[in-house]
Amino acid sequence: MRRTFTSGNIAIAEGAMAAGLGFYAGYPITPSSEIMEYLAEKLPQRGGVVVQMEDEIGSINAVIGASWAGLKSMTATSGPGFSLMAEALGLAVITETPLVVVNVMRTGPSTGVPTKTSQSDVFQARWPSHGDYIIPCYCPWSVQEAYDLTIKAFNTAELLRTPVVLLSDAVLAHLWEPLTMYDQGEIEVVNRKVPSKDTAVLPYKPDIDLVPPMPLLGHGFKTIVESLVHDEKGYYAPRDADYRALVKRLILKVLKRIDYVYEHEALFLDDAEVVLVSYGSTARSVYLATRELRKREVRAGFLRLKTLWPLNDEKIRESCRAKKVIVVENNMGKIYMDIDRVLKDKEVYSAPVLSLELPMVREVLEAVEPWL
């Protein structure tokens, strides 16, 4: 391993290469552009390919194609570009295409303030496209975690044959901190299952884990990559039984591995009378606010979500034993809705801290004070 000092965007790029990234397609957009710029220099030196596409629609579709050719693939964007990727993300879901999409959140709606931060894309990351599905979503709070969770995002994509979203933001993108990078063999790297070439292949026939081995294009397999509801052969199947089987499996293959997919950090919860819940860069200020409350003899606990979707309801309930829970986020209260659902027997309050910068500790304390 080696230690360096770098930004969140570069940490994401390094994490992707550590996980085995082979193909990147993207289009420059603030505040994610450094990811592509850095990879354009570094990835070809490791045998990978970087392509600047004409737009974000072309980028996500190129990434889908490269993944089906057997390469671990990624794109990165921000809110307006992520909106353009929505339809193709639905294609990646129904064709069970492993890939990673990095969304470096900035202020919206529309073009908003391109250089400023937000956490308003949380629902967009959960439901970018139409239909029933679960796209796993990770949300780092530090440069080190940007690296670590990028690796985790690739492993989840390969393990479950699914697209995965890494939800960063403008603060983390340009934050510089120490980073420990690992050498080959020091990290877990998951590779997708591929069927044996001497067997008859049904491209969507699942194993016991509900994940089908992936017959790669150009590797001697005969397969269909079908965007319509399909059966295990990949043929269009507009029948109730096939529709139910496909959609339920797409969701259950993720939920079946919830213990792997879901992560959170819990601090000061043993004696907590109130728990502050947060995620991403905003959680940095919420953590300091929690410590300040404890200095004031308020028994405050801290729960930080690393995985935003899917949430592990059972683990959240186990952690939040306090009667009162306050959800602090840089939006008008999105994760709050699910925490309120999960902890329906608690007093759950939303404390939005709308800020174009990293919220100050003082702002967090002012937001939570009415509920203490």
Image (cartoon, rainbow, N blue to C red):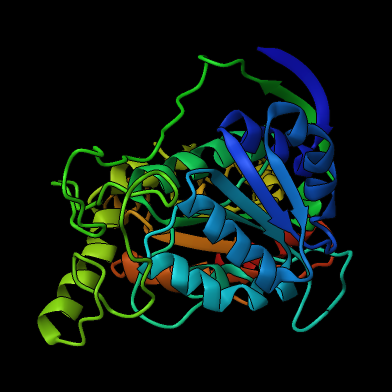
**Labels in figure, total:** 0
Residue at the left extreme, as displayed: 241
- Is residue 171 depicted above or below 195 in this figure? below
* Quadrant occupied by the C terminus: bottom right
Q: Nearer the viewer, residue 113 or 229?
A: 229
User: Can you give x and y, in whole percent of width and height, for residue 70 in the image?
Assistant: 47, 44
Q: Residue at x 56, y 40 (%)?
A: 149
Give the side of residue 314 with respect to residue 179, left or right: left
Q: Nearer the viewer, residue 276 or 66?
A: 66
- Is residue 125 depicted above or below 254 in this figure? below
User: Can you give x and y, in whole percent of width and height, for residue 125 in the image?
Assistant: 55, 67
Q: Residue at x 89, y 64 (%)?
A: 115
Q: Residue at x 76, y 71 (%)?
A: 55
Residue at the front extreme, as displayed: 220
Q: Which corner quadrant of the image does residue 191 belong to?
A: top left
Q: Residue at x 42, y 52 (%)?
A: 217
- Is residue 184 depicted above or below 160 in this figure? above
Q: Which corner quadrant of the image does residue 351 belong to?
A: bottom right
User: Can you give x and y, in whole percent of width and height, for residue 261 in the image?
Assistant: 38, 46
**Can residue 347 be seen?**
no
**Can residue 326 be seen?**
yes
Give the side of residue 197 with respect to residue 91, left or right: left
* Quadrant occupied by the N terminus: top right
User: Can you give x and y, in whole percent of width and height, for residue 20 in the image?
Assistant: 56, 33
